[in-house]
Image (cartoon, helix red, strand yellow):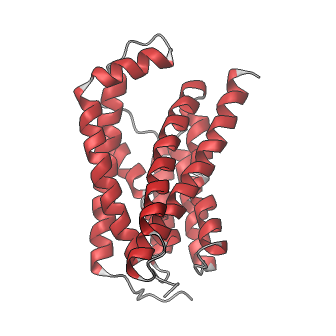
Amino acid sequence: MPTLKPKFPKAASLGIIAAIILDTVIQITWKLAASSAPHDGSFRTLALSALASRYFYVAMGFFCLQLLNWIKVLALIDLSFAQPMTALSYVSVLTCSSLLLHEKVSLSHTVGILFILGGVFLVSRTKAQTTL
Amino acid sequence: MSSHAFGLAILILAVLIESLAQLCLKQGATSNVVKPVRPKLWLTLGVILYCLEIGFYTIALNNLDVSVAFPIGSLCFVAVALLSHFYLKEKITTIRWLGIASIVIGSALVSL
């Protein structure tokens, strides 16, 4: 049986929560930047119109914050513990896409979310720092 | 090479680059605390690889359906776990592997 009381530094859990929120904001703003492009399928058109979108710069700003936050998290806990946790951003992105962008959530989405939540739960039951 | 095969090749490259970027960031982050072994070099390398990965991933998405790209992209969780185990000597228990497997399955399902 896995231990039910894993060691999990509080600063690390706050960092992971921040990482998930930042990731969600980045993905949504990134999508908004990309969707303002005309759909002619060309990568060049997509890139140029993304550069002209203010969402692109918002996404970039949050991306820098994300990087700084992530480095702080990695200083505290295992990479193989922290990185799977970020899969929770799939869940938050899907929720936000449904609520803000009115995208439909199907049955396979719901089952997928349950698998991700289960997986993150299992990872969270393991010891966060194994190398020190 | 068809656009699909090209997309797949670029995507697999993106997954490998992202995993290496994570490894560099971890190496740089830990160096700050435990042993000062060129943390700035590792962090810079990590950031460069990360930016490269975003470019590759965007090109891959341009050539593939999200329903194909996303599950393959989520194999990054497996690649990072393998690198963490072999290179960083992290202990990955059966429970952690099961969790990672469940996350990969879940990621495949949310992209359907």
Q: Residue at x 48, y 40 (%)?
A: B54
Q: Is residue B38 visible?
A: yes
Q: Residue A97: which quarter of the image?
A: top left
Q: Residue at x 25, y 31 (%)?
A: A55
Whether residue A29 sits left or right of residue B94 in the image: it is left
| Quarter assignment of residue A51 | top left
* B57 over A1 or under it: above or below: above
Q: Is residue A77 left or right of residue B12?
A: left
Report the residue that reaches farthest toward the right. B1
Where residue B18 sits in the image (x, y, percent)? 54, 51
- Location of residue B109 in the rendering, given as x and y in whole percent from the top left corner: 55, 46
- Whether residue A97 is visible, yes or no, is no
User: Residue B97: x and y, percent?
Assistant: 61, 71
Residue at 57%, 65% in the rendered image:
B100
Q: Is residue B3 left or right of residue A111?
A: right
Q: Nearer the viewer, residue B16 or A112?
A: B16
Q: Is residue A58 left or right of residue A115?
A: left
